[in-house]
Amino acid sequence: MEVTASDLDNLKATELRLGLPGIDAPEKPAPVSPRGSKRALLVSNEECWPGKNKSPEADSGGQEAQPMAKAQVVGWPPIRSYRKNSFKARKEEMEAAGLFVKVSMDGAPYLRKIDLKVYQDYKELKEALDNMFRCFSTGELSGMQGCNGSEYAITYEDKDGDWMLVGDVPWEMFMSSCKRLRIMRRSEATGMPSSP
Amino acid sequence: MTYFPEEVVEHIFDFLSSHRDHNAVSTVCKAWYRVERLSRRSVFVGNCYAVRPERVVARFPGVRSLSVKGKPHFADFNLVPDDWGGFALPWIEAFARGSPGLEELRLKRMVVSDECLELLARFFPNFKVLVLISCEGFSTDGLAAIATHCRVLRELDLQENEVEDRGPRWLSCFPDSCTSLVSLNFACLKGEVNAGALERLVARCPNIRTLRLNCAVSVDSLSKILACAPHLVDLGTGSFTIDHPAEAYHRLINNFTKYKSLKSLSGFWDASPRCLPAVYPICGNLTGLNLSYAPAIQGADLIKLIRLCLKLQRLWVLDCIGDKGLAVVASTCKELQELRVFPSDVCGAGTAAVTEEGLVAISSGCPKLNSLLYFCHQMTNAALVTVAKNCPYFTRFRLCILDPGKPDPVTNQPLDEGFGAIVQSCKDLRRLSLSGLLTDQVFLYIGMYAERLEMLSIAFAGDSDKGMVYVLNGCKNLRKLEIRDSPFGDAALLEDVGKYETMRSLWMSSCYVTLKGCKTLAAKMPRLNVEVINERDESNEMEENPSDLRIVEKMYVYRTVAGPRNDAPDFVWML
């Protein structure tokens, strides 16, 4: 959201404070952590009165602040701890486990395995693949859109078993649907003539 | 009718099925009271602190089946501190002393220790049925005691309990002579299970109809177990992931095709979609399906499965089913009565998985729908009005918009009109949970229209005391009211103090009620227990004359004939 000149003049906008931006209510002291409670007490519920979060037009960045409020309300959403815990455990397992996929390259005598979670975006992935398979290729690998004139295309097998060109979908979506990678010679890729 | 011999009256009372009818006839006259109390076989105690266990035993010496509930409902969401109370031990001890003929015990939200289970195992020779729901405090050692000593055990049903795992030996404690099991549910146990012992147990219990396994049971084991239990009606699968595809998978497929009687399926922990085709043959018979613990089953796999379930009446899924998936449910499951859609991303900050569209689709495709629990990212008044029109038979309607206090995103209005439409249209509504942006207006509607309402859950709603007063004045059948983070204070609390004696309980947390208000209520109504729960470490403050005007963090009020309880921890003040 745009910050107007008057906002800049208003020191309040730059004031560092606890709580969500745009809330003008006086600071309430956060409660001491509860006795004997297994759960971590997060932000006080009083910060999250709907009355105070109304009129997002008046706030700059008030809307982005909303998800923060959600995550910090104790006992919300109202899901049984049993269910919450079983998902948390699963999630932690998955996060720790990494997302290892096989990478094959046409002509290379062996495959490699990489952890997709280590990379933030396609650029990093491409660099990593370049490094890994440099010894097997003469030039740079490329499979991304907009790259011409290279010998290889980077493809992946998705959840449905189809072979897709890497780079079309958002990174997150790619990560969740990629089952394995194949660095394919362009001459093999249908409809793509090999470049000199 | 008082001229009939007592045996005849007793015989007539045997036909009464509901607790309420029993309670009603017992108040007619002394003779009926006497007959009723001696003939009563089943007692339901909705609040364990409403009456002393000894009194129940004394009044109903012939009781065979006891159900008791402990902690307030909001304990499910961590709003009640751990040591608040709800102990099962006094109940079991009282019955062990006075009524050891007890055969069935059902406990919900109570603290059950291993000692409790050992008492049950040793002092009740005819003990047949144990059902524990959302309980805690026991371990697999306690289960071992039950398995070892309960000779005629028919049902061991553990639902969503926190159980300490002390190893797999408990299952092996069922003696070879135990052949009476009809229902075994240990899905909530986290630990390993002795596969061989389990297979042998199932094999020697010919009457087993319900079997819910935990995530430690492999597909391999599942295959063997299924082979021994051909008449299963309700199955909770184990892990349902396949390590060695071919053999185990084919065995599973073969076994499932035999199961004509299987009506209900759950479990699917860590299920890999590759296993799903194994269950396709029986999908057409299913009336109940619970996939809410299977985040890996999504998209095309999920939809393919749903399309086969033409007779489904009860469906529990995660919101990754999406609005599109719900549209498939709507077009396939015409018999659907109960739907629960749980959030898969518990932080609620992810992609919008289901919205009002999914709910509207369901309502138009499934007119028999009467029970709903729906977690979504947004809801509109228009959608709720449509749902109300399409499904007038709701008895339970629980809507949870993940963002507290969120308005209708299309009109930016509160959701008063939408919920108003629901309560007006659904004349049999017994349970309602509200969410989203709501003003006092919605409570006016609830007070006006929700005549049969028994339980109401309110969070982040309302503008003033008037809201709560509308509800207290209007809902004649209200039994349980639970409120959090809403601007209701002493004036609302004290508006009609007599009302609380007609209700089981009232919970208010993070509202505007003060200590003075609570004390006033307690003083006026001696037959209510008014509990103030203070978790902050304020021992210093307390000594220095606590201000009565201070806002109370959590308050729990309930009617009781047992007086103030003697097992309350320090942070609970009994006023």
Image (cartoon, coloured by chain):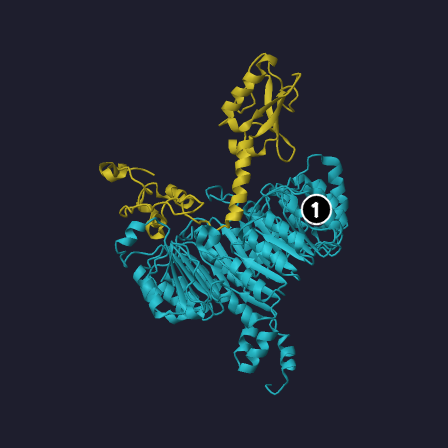
Chain colours: A yellow, B cyan
Q: Is residue B474 left or right of residue A3?
A: right
> Of B111 and B333, which appears nearest the observer?
B111
Q: From the image, tell me which residue sits under label 1.
A: B198
Up-down relation of residue B476 to residue B143 (above or below):
below
Q: Is residue B468 left or right of residue A29?
A: right
Up-down relation of residue B345 to residue B568 (above or below):
above
Q: Is residue B495 left or right of residue B164?
A: left
**Quadrant that contains the C terminus of chain A:** top right
Amino acid type of disc 1? Leu
Subunit under mark 1: B
Could one spot residue B304 in this view of the protein? no
Q: Quadrant of residue B251?
A: top right
Which percent across, then down, holds residue B411? 41, 53
Disc tally is 1
Which percent across, then down, holds residue B137? 53, 50
Which percent across, then down, holds residue B224? 75, 44
**Quadrant that contains the N terminus of chain A:** top left
SS at circle 1: helix
The residue drawn where x is 64% and y is 32% is: A162
Mark 1 surroundings: few (<14), some (14-19) or many (≥20) residues within 10 A: some
Could one spot residue A24 in this view of the protein? yes
Up-down relation of residue B142 to residue A14 (above or below):
below
Which percent across, then down, holds residue B196? 72, 43
